[in-house]
Amino acid sequence: MINKSYKHWMIVFFMCCLAASSIGLCTNAIGVFYTPVAKSLKVLKGTFAMHATLSTLATALTSLKMSKVIKKYFYKEVLLIGVILSSGATWLMSYSTSVYLFYILGILRGIGVGIYGMVLITVVITN
């Protein structure tokens, strides 16, 4: 039998990993890629940076609805959908050759981050 205290700390650890991936990688570290990707796509940095704005906006709008979604569905299913959507969109960005495709994938990644981001992590930790 697993010690309940150990299980709680493991949940906190994994939620911190999710927070690092949602906030750290998808929001804070994105600025590192502006210059190389903008040069590769032959667009201005501001044009490419718009995908991060769209991603953050999608995250904010998705986060507003997450409290209702959490009450209706299981945490694991919601987390899995959000992580797959976010990581899949980020993976597809590595193959993108159009700034408009970056915009679409940025919105999808933002929706994924909104699904498994701050609201769900906070609810799981407090419960």
Image (cartoon, rainbow, N blue to C red):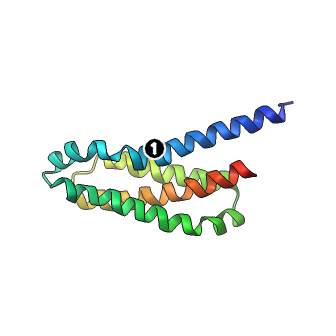
Image quarter in which the N terminus is found: top right
Is 111 positioned to the left or the right of 44 in the image?
Answer: right
* Residue 15 lies in quadrant: top right
Which residue was labeled with disc 1? 24
Three-letter amino acid code of the residue under disc 1: Gly
The front one of 18 and 72 is 18
Is 104 positioned to the left or the right of 22 in the image?
Answer: left
Is 26 positioned to the left or the right of 81 in the image?
Answer: left
Extreme right residue here? 1
Is 115 positioned to the left or the right of 40 in the image?
Answer: right
Q: Is mark 1 on a helix, strand or loop?
A: helix
Q: Which residue is drawn at 29% across and 56% down?
A: 102
x and y, in percent, of residue 73 in the image: 69, 62
Vertical position of residue 10 compared to residue 114: above or below: above
Q: Which residue is drawn at 45% across and 47% down?
A: 87
How crowded pointer 1 is (Cα within 10 Å; few <14, some 14-19, many 20+) is rated as few
x and y, in percent, of residue 35 in the image: 20, 45
x and y, in percent, of residue 22 in the image: 49, 48
